[in-house]
Image (spheres, rainbow, N blue to C red):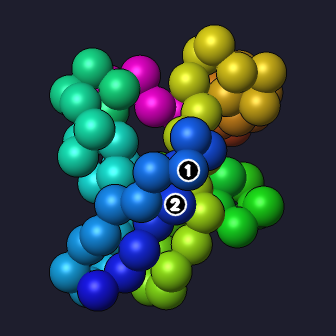
Amino acid sequence: MIKITLPDGSIREFEGAVTPMDVAKSISDGLARNTISAIVNGKQVEVTTPVTEDSTVQLLTWNDDMGKKAFWHSSAHLLAQA
């Protein structure tokens, strides 16, 4: 079991590896739709990054400055490829 600690102190348990998107989906579909990035153990990661050990996870949305920066950064990469 992997224990994920959220910013409010609540703990969610998962069988095997989990991604920040899986954590968001376990909370609500609306949060999952709005999650842009995450901070796992103090490091900003993509929502598809596997979490394989007990960790602290903060989900980032457009309402967070770091979420906006992640969105803009990803958008810049997409525009550069076009």
- How far across and down, in percent of the image, does residue 72 sit? 72, 23
Task: Answer whether residue 39 is visible to the viewer in this image.
Answer: yes
Taking the image as shown, residue 19 lies to the left or right of residue 60, namely left
Residue 76 spot, x, y in % from top left:
73, 28
Question: Residue visible at 34% across and 52% down?
Answer: 23
**2 and 1 marks in contact (CB < 8 Å):** yes
In 3D space, how far apart are the residues under numbered discs 2 and 1 (Cα atoms)? 6 Å
CA neighbours of label 1 inside 10 A, class few (<14), some (14 to 19), many (20+): few
Q: Magenta segment: does it hold 15?
A: no
Callout 1: helix, strand or loop?
loop
Q: Which residue is mark 1?
A: 9
Amino acid of disc 2: Thr
Front-lying residue, 17 or 5: 5
Residue 78 seen by the camera? no
**Residue 61, position in %: x, y?**
56, 24
Q: Over which residues does the magenta segment extend?
A: 33-37
The circle drawn on residue 79 is none
In the displayed orientation, state which residue is furthest to the front: 9
Residues 36 and 77: in front is 36
Badge nearest the viewer, 2 or 1: 1
Q: Is residue 26 left or right of residue 59?
A: left
Q: Secondary structure at mark 2?
A: strand
What residue is at 20 percent from the left and 28 percent from the top? 29
- Mark sitting on residue 5: 2
Name the residue nearer the viewer: 60 or 73: 60
Q: Residue at x 79, y 21 (%)?
A: 65
**Looking at the image, how many numbered discs can be counted on the residues?**
2
Picture layout, residue 38 above or below residue 5: above
Left or right: 42, with 60 as reference point: right
Q: Give whichever of 29, 37 is nearer the camera.
A: 29
Query: Which image quadrant for residue 52?
Result: bottom left
